[in-house]
Image (cartoon, rainbow, N blue to C red):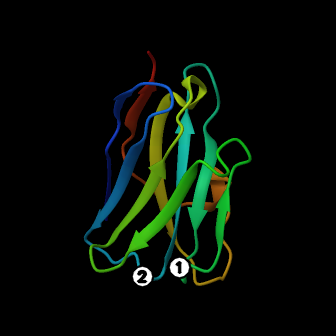
Amino acid sequence: VQLQASGGGLVQPGGSLRLSCAASGFTLDYNAIGWFRQAPGKEREGVSCISSSDVGILYADSVKGRFTISRDKSKNTVYLQMNSLKPEDTAVYYCATVLDLRQSCFLGTSNYEYWGQGTLVTVSS
């Protein structure tokens, strides 16, 4: 079971990035997936999540209207499209997953079992 997060980088304020979370060794079809971030000196926080059915989607208030989570089951990959990036979005971003057939997803870290390594997003001019 392996999750690979990628797509981070340096972007100017107002710019965009798309993060990818690819799974290997198992299918994400029955899993909820969450995106989290951790800035230096801060706790890890939930950013967005998507349920196994793709019906349940949540966003943290700080990213609503700017970030979009989506899933491509044919590629066994979940994406986080991040637009209108702000310096306060700077953090290491992680994806996580758990086998969960419920219609809802959750933004708490304790709800997830498997974690990928992080990808660094830096928003700076």
Residue 20 in the image: state x and y as whole percent: 35, 54
Residue 39 in the image: state x and y as whole percent: 56, 26
**Residue nearest the viewer, comparing 82 with 53:** 82
- Closer to the N terminus: mark 1 or mark 2? 2
36, above or below 97, in the image: above
Q: Which residue is mark 1?
A: 52
**Residue nearest the viewer, comparing 63 with 99:** 63
* Quarter of image, res 3: bottom left
Callout 1 secondary element: loop
The amino acid type, in three-letter code, at marker 2 is Asp
**Quadrant location, the N terminus:** bottom left
Q: Is residue 32 left or right of residue 76?
A: right
62, above or below 21, in the image: above
**Quadrant location, the C terminus:** top left
Q: Is residue 114 left or right of residue 49?
A: left
* Quarter of image, res 26: bottom left
The residue located at (56%, 51%) in the rendering is 67
Residue 32 shows which numbered tag?
Answer: none
108, above or below 30, in the image: above
**Residue nearest the viewer, comparing 71 with 4:** 71
> CA separation, marks 1 and 2?
6 Å
74, above or below 17, in the image: below
The amino acid type, in three-letter code, at marker 1 is Ser
The reply to whether dot 1 and dot 2 touch (C-beta < 8 Å) is yes
Callout 2 secondary element: loop
Report crowding for label 2: few under 14, some 14 to 19, many 20 or more residues within 10 A (C-alpha): some
Q: Which residue is mark 2?
A: 29
Residue 5 in the image: state x and y as whole percent: 34, 49
Q: Is residue 25 left or right of residue 122?
A: left
Report crowding for label 1: few under 14, some 14 to 19, many 20 or more residues within 10 A (C-alpha): many
